[in-house]
Image (cartoon, helix red, strand yellow):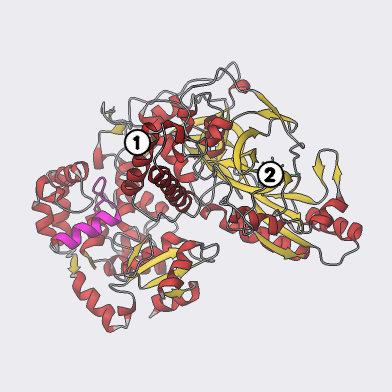
Amino acid sequence: MRIPNHISQQVDKLREAIDRHNYNYSVLDEPSIPDSEYDKLFLELQKLEQSYPQLITLDSPTQRVGATPLEKFSQITHRSPMLSLNNEFDTSSVEAFDRRVGEKLGTNEVEYAVEPKFDGLAVSLLFENGSFVTGATRGDGYIGEDVTLNLRTVKSIPLHLRKSDKNRIPFLLEIRGEVLMLKEDFEKLNLQQREKNEKEFMNPRNAAAGSLRQLDPRVTATRRLAFFAYGIGEFEGEEIPRDTHSNVMKYLASQGFPIAKECDVVRGSVALLSYYQKVKELREHLPYDIDGVVYKINSLAQQKEMGFVSRAPRFAVAHKFPAQEVVTELLGIDVQVGRTGVLTPVARLRPIFVGGATVAHATLHNEDEINRKDVMVGDSVIVRRAGDVIPEVVGVVIERRPSNASRFMMPNQCPVCGAKVIRMSDEAVTRCTAGLFCPAQRKQSIMHFASRRGMDIEGLGEKLVDKLVDNGFVVTPADLYTLDDEKLTSLSRMAKKSAINLLAAINKSKSTTLASFIYALGIRNVGVTTARELARYFGDFNKLKEANVKTLQGIPDVGLVVAQSITDFFSEKHNIEVINKLFSDPVGIELKEERDIRKMQDGNNANKISGKTFVLTGALPNMSREDAKERIESLGGKVTSSVSKKTNYVVVGAASGSKYDKAVELGIVTLDEAKLLELLKN
Ligand code: IVH
């Protein structure tokens, strides 16, 4: 059958458009059309290809996911071996590396291409006449596994190269890089695994490995893998740069391959070390896991001159970060009782240095989690501590399990107050049933009440709350307001001056906002944001107190569970008693109207923030993004995630990406941390 001209033209046009949108979405992370529009184009192409199967080509976007699972992977011998890098861990070894290089090349300040070291899996992608033909894992460096069908499902790997300016396409090009899973996609995958009651992955690297080594490419296609190029292997083609590594990387980017935004070119060892420091600080803000940085001599001629030693190049090294995952012994499992009575098993560990700190405890979340991870006391466990995240046990080294390892059993009594514990069939957690009669819950709820985002009582820390509750001075939050200096100074290690300061702080807390007060009550499932929404919606505490589930569900972000928690809280007699005490003499909490505060701030020149929309991008040197967000919001500003014409300010930190470009493009005011702080101060 002859194919009408306009049909093949339409097919070409659709493929070009789909590839372009896919590139914008998967490589640039800047979607150019809504998903529904993309799906429409895709469907139209699929239909045309069904009617005219002669038009189907292997590099058509519809052909990413093959239909037949493999029996096993076949082997691929790499055209040139995939070597590994020597690892350095400290400053002096890096300086020694730079010295060696300088001496051998007879140069003073060597120029290096510097890059993050991805924590994923090395792969090699072969393009022949511009088309992606085979892809292999690193294997032993000489022979890898043929994972072509799986790599074809990775959306950020182009299925064909673009023509160069001179209309040329390389005859052969082997691209080397790393397959990984973005942190965000890893979290989503584990959530799905949990919902399906299947084993979770320990970290993004394991998830990426498990996904890439699937025999059924349809499974890989559901896993959202990413690819980043970091170099080339064999090639034949005039257009491929032969001068510097950084130009090779530029070329790869121009061909549609994702490369790390953090790539740079620097000179000398001082600059290498400051790059290391910079990327180390960025680490937790990056969308993917990295385990160090890589320094490569930039000039390809100089690289050649340096050559190789055994299986590693002499022209490059990896400078590794301190490990974020380590193995240690699980000495025991303690059970802590939280504010809402939830019993949390906590791992007691043989203390170990991980992610920059010594860790002796790590959360195990709940009973199911312990069983899913098959954790037993006495096991060698893998502990992860990344950035500010609470350390957690991510898995067990089963081979090292001792014969006397013992299973953990959730107690059937509260370890603090002895009351019965229950576990609802629809919940993963076990709770103490004693409510505020349980000292642990009482302490936690008082701490929550006094916390910064709650009543903000400065100086009321955990140790003090322990003493106040243990001495019977404080049973409910209302009792805080009955404290006097006699009671306080009777406590061990409480000086007169601290007592006075604390009483002043308690007194000051009486005047607060509705949102802070709602948050302070510690209603289950009501965090800062929900508390703020509730305050904005009701504007009056009594209205909230009397609201029914239906009304509550009408509020943005409030679903059935939250609504139910709120009505449950207010139907508890004990809670109402405490609230009544808080509002009447001698306590007399006074809620300022949010509007008054807004006015006050406006008067104070804070209208620079109030009502304005901010976008935060990149890592700020001294403030966490969470902190910045909170401070902006506390002054009535709004923080959103994407830059549009409605954005008033873009706060720009290190390694900011497309959001910064967009801000410049739209002419939006950009602020660095110092300028933001200035605004906040005003
Ligand atoms: S260059 C000749 N660059 O690290 C060495 N490797 O130990 C070629 N890796 O298996 C490797 N990020 O998977 C290079 N920016 C980067 C890298 C990188 C991660 C991995 C790679 C390789 C291992 C080398």
In front here: 59 or 9? 9
**Along the viewing direction, whichever of 156 and 582 lies nearer the viewer:** 156
Residue at left 48%, top 27%?
A: 373
Q: Is residue 442 above or below residue 367?
A: below
- Spatial CA distance of label 2 from label 1 is 32 Å
Tell me the quadrant of the picture where the N terminus can be found: top left
Ligand 1 position by quadrant:
top right
- In x, y percent, where is residue 53? 42, 31
Is 273 left or right of 96, judged from the image as shown?
Answer: left
Q: Earlier in the sequence, mark 2 or mark 1?
A: 1
Judged by its main secondary structure, the magenta piece is helix
* Rendered view: 47 above or below 533: above
Instruction: Tell me if 194 is positioned left or right of 120 in this view.
Output: left
Q: Front-most of 247 and 346?
A: 247
- Does the rendering let one see residue 443? no
Work out which quarter of the rendered image holds the C terminus and state it: bottom left
In which quarter of the view is residue 507 placed?
bottom left
* Residue at the image position 58 percent from the left and 32 percent from the top: 148
Q: Nearer the viewer, residue 618 or 105?
A: 105
What residue would you read off at disc 2? 171
Q: Magenta stretch: residue 427 in it?
A: no
Range drawn in magenta: 520-537
Left or right placement of residue 329 versus residue 458 in this view:
right
Give yes or no for residue 536 being in the magenta stretch.
yes
Name the residue carrying label 1. Answer: 47
Snapshot quadrant of residue 613:
bottom left
User: Looking at the rendering, which quadrant does residue 141 occupy?
Assistant: top right
Numbered disc 2: secondary structure: loop
Residue 245: % across, % down: 72, 56
Give the residue type that dot 1 points to.
Answer: Lys
- Position of 308 with respect to 64 (left or right) is right
- Amino acid at the residue labelled 2: Phe
